[in-house]
Amino acid sequence: MFFKIPIGEVIGIIGAFLGSAELAFAISVVLLGKPFVKILGAKLKRIFLRHKAVQPAKPVGKRRYYIGIVFLLLSFLPWFIAELALFFGYPKTEDGHTILLLIMLSGDAMFIISLFTLGGDFWDRLKNLFQYPRPGGGGK
């Protein structure tokens, strides 16, 4: 027990925090759009790659795009696996809870990998899905 809270509840709270952070980041990217992704990428490159200049992004190829979509869709699968495992009472030991947490973290990792794989142009298309069309026919 952690602070007299059962391990199952602690795992649930951690899962809620991780899931809400992932959802908040996805919503912020959709709402803020491609400039946000570019600025964030440039800042991360400046932090981790100080010796290299930031180069313009290359267009994403068809194979890379499909791989990114598969990763994006598969990133939600571990959460369903964790829910089913909890529903059927799987984690009965401490190792079971650790495995469940690692399954959920793998979903987060796949989500982040899919963002970098799909590139910035993907977010432009996604952002256009949420724009209300004007009565005159213009989307913007």
Image (tube, rainbow, N blue to C red):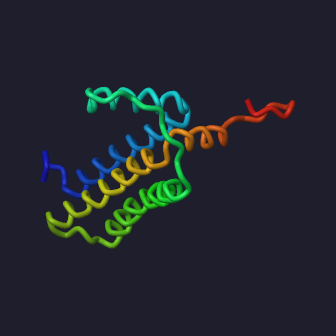
Q: Where residue 71 sits in the image (x, y, percent)?
A: 44, 57
* Residue 90 falls left or right of residue 116: left
- Point out the residue furthest to the right here: 136
Q: Quadrant of the C terminus?
A: top right
Residue 96 falls in which quadrant of the image? bottom left
The residue sitting at 77% across, 35% down in the picture is: 133
Q: Position of residue 39 (x, y in %)?
A: 44, 26
> Residue at image x 26%, y 62%?
100
Lateral position of residue 74 relative to residue 103, left or right: right
The residue nearer to you, when weighing 87 against 64, is: 64
Q: Nearer the viewer, residue 19 or 31?
A: 31
Asked if 87 appears above or below 12 in the picture, the reply is below
The residue lying toward the viewer, choosing from 113 and 58, is: 58
Q: Is residue 18 above or below residue 7?
A: above
- In which image quadrant can residue 125 be found? top right
Seen at 12% across and 53% down, the residue is: 1
> x and y percent of residue 91 in the render?
23, 68
Residue at 49% in and 43% down: 119
